Amino acid sequence: MTTRRTVFFVSDGTGITAETLGHSLMSQFENLTFNQVRMPFIDSMEKALDCVQRIEETARRDGVRPIVVSTLVRAEVAAVLNRSGGVVLDFFGAFIAPLEAELGQKSSHTIGRSHGRATSKDYLARIEAVNFTMAHDDGVTDHDLDKADVILIGVSRCGKTPTSLYLALQFGIKAANYPLIPEDFERNRLPDTLAPHRQKLFGLTIAPERLTQIRQERRPDSRYASLDNCRWEVDQAQKLMRRENIRWLESTTKSIEEIAATLMQTLGLDRLTY
């Protein structure tokens, strides 16, 4: 049996839902490698036929049927894809019909409905959160910190920025982040700008060995990236967070999604995803 398969993510919108679903499914097969093909905006019969042609060409080339994860809404377009010869996992086809039966009404079958409109209140809230997060990245400013939903702290390069941006973009959470630096450890207390917002603080820490690898890419062979310095900074940061009774999380082996979910659960933050 081949250990390499091709998977198509087919959608009449951006394809985000198809990819999210597909990645969750494919991750369960650890001994296989998947070539990923993204096909968004398949919103007409003509585009569906072109998609089918690519799937069939891939099947002939690989000698096995491609996996097709579909979130096509329009039934007639989805029907074309189902004739492709691929292994079609039809997300809407599998779940819409049982929901229609249970809820007692037909679905709208509206393309792009799951991601809302660019003028919707929720969408604008996410954009506002992203702007706030970018303006408050890496302790650039302490202005309007009272408006933050969460303030991430930790040593440099422990994952604060990507986690903050994910929280803002995915959940509309205004996430500031602030680096803990040697001067903070020497003072043996939190920076003055953070003290008034103690209840919003959440710490990230990381294994020193992983931290030095990350920092070597940024500043090779520097004291900043040395293992001894990384061990000292991580140790001091953890001691500071324990002393200040700040909730924190080890990020070394966790994905951004796992960090965000744990943080939101710990702090009681609740936002919708889109």
Image (cartoon, rainbow, N blue to C red):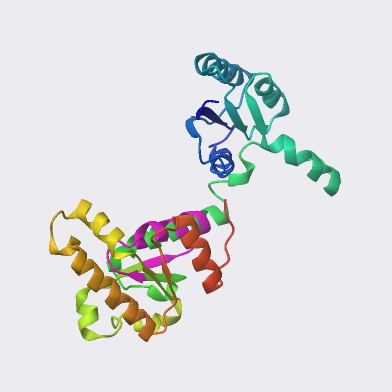
Is 64 in front, or is 109?
A: 64
Q: Is residue 219 above or below residue 195?
A: above
Q: In this view, does 158 lie to the left or right of 69?
A: left
Give the residues in magenta: 153-176
Does residue 81 show up? yes
At x 42%, y 84%, the residue is: 245
- Residue 42 position, x and y percent, is 58, 27
- Residue 156 position, x and y percent, is 27, 65
At x 68%, y 19%, the residue is: 83
- Residue 40 position, x and y percent, is 53, 31
Q: Does the magenta stretch include residue 210?
A: no
Q: In which quarter of the image is the N terminus?
A: top right
Is 219 in front, or is 111?
A: 219
Q: Is residue 163 magenta?
A: yes
Q: Is residue 62 above or below residue 32?
A: above
Is 34 in front, or is 44?
A: 34
